[in-house]
Amino acid sequence: MDETVEPAAARGGGEFWIILAGLATSAATLAITFALAQADVSVMGFYLNWVIPVGAVGAGLVAGSGYALATWLKGVKVGKWLCLLIVAFQVACYFEAQVLDFRRLGLVYEDGTRVGFWEYFDFSTRSFAWKQRDGSLGEPLGLWGYALRGLEVTGFGLGGLIGALILRAKPYCERCRRYMKSVVVTTIPAAPHKPKAKKNEVRDVAPDLPDKAAAAAAVETAAEKAGKTLERLIELAANGDVEGFDRLAEESTAAARAIPKGLRRLQVHLVHCPACSGGRLRVVAQEGKGDKTAVQEVGTWEAPGEFVRGLLQRRTAVSSGA
């Protein structure tokens, strides 16, 4: 898998394409919400518990997806200024949609004088009303309509940031200006345990009840063993020993699969750049199951490019049956 990837820095024009893609998805999203509004479906009007603008946030998320997608494809690092730019364009698109809707209506007073945009905006904002159980509209909210308008604009603007913030949390290769990939290479058991019962095996249902000192000693022993395994993996990676690393990783993964789920374990990730093969080992401790899993960062250790490239090639060859 000697993959040659063109560094993002060589492609250029990233910021232009980010803005263009974001404006395109924003325009498409607002066009869809406008069409739905004509069918009496107000996407922006969906609120959770009366104050959380889930509709506006959802519309903003879809509208801002173009910014996130182009940022990832062009390898532009998400920083403070890009976030501010996205919010500014989201808010601008929101008000542009209001202006276009206003122009479409062509409102005039009885004497033929055209209604101004801000007059229309103020009237429509004060006219916000909650839909009643019978489907009819309640009393207009008046000045309180501006509170909902503010939530709507904020939700749409910040909703567009969600994709970019997800990217901001991802590892980034400064050398190649692109986002790095991450793959789990092994899991190390780090808690004392009894072997799983085999199918149809009869065991005493009474649980073991060791004293606190014995339990603490067992926990310490398991943690020390996991720590030594991790140290050995880090050493093998630093020395570029792909075969030795992979062999120990397979042994650790097999041992982790043999213990009950939910017990403490160390998960080792290989974070790597597809362009230069620069990378590092990232280790997290996990304990629990499902949505109750607790995750704790253990640390990161640099890995040589030759090791990263060799391990990925070896794993690819094994998975493809070569």
Image (cartoon, rainbow, N blue to C red):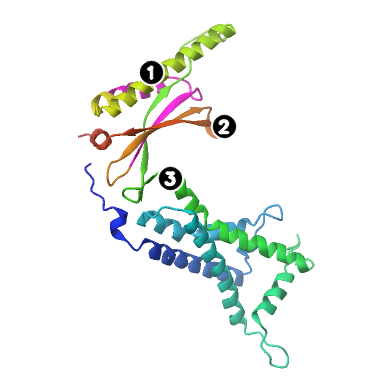
Corner quadrant of residue 246: top left
Q: Which mark is residue 129?
A: none
Residue farthest to the left, as pictured: 322
| Residue at 62% over, 55% down | 54
Q: Which residues are magenta?
A: 247-272
Q: Are marks 3 and 2 in contact (CB under 8 Å)?
A: no
Label 2 vs label 1: CA separation?
27 Å
Residue 228 is marked as 1
* Secondary structure beneath label 2: helix
Q: Amino acid at mark 3?
A: Lys
Q: Earlier in the sequence, mark 3 or mark 2?
A: 3
Quarter holding residue 13: bottom left
Amino acid type at image mark 1: Lys
Amino acid type indicated by mark 2: Lys
Q: CA distance from mark 3 to mark 2?
A: 23 Å
Q: Would you call the spot at circle 3 few (<14 residues within 10 Å), some (14-19), or many (20 or more)? A: some
The residue where tag 2 is placed is 292
Residue located beneath label 3 in the image: 170
- Depth check: 43 or 23 in front? 23
Judged from the image, the secondary structure of the residue bearing numbered disc 3 is: loop
| Distance in Å between CA atoms under marks 1 and 3 | 29 Å
The answer to whether 287 is drawn above or below residue 62 in the figure is above
Give the mark, 1 or 3, whose residue is nearer the N terminus.
3
Residue drawn at 37 percent across, 61 percent down: 14
For mark 1, give the secondary structure: helix
On the picture, is 313 further left or further right than 204? left
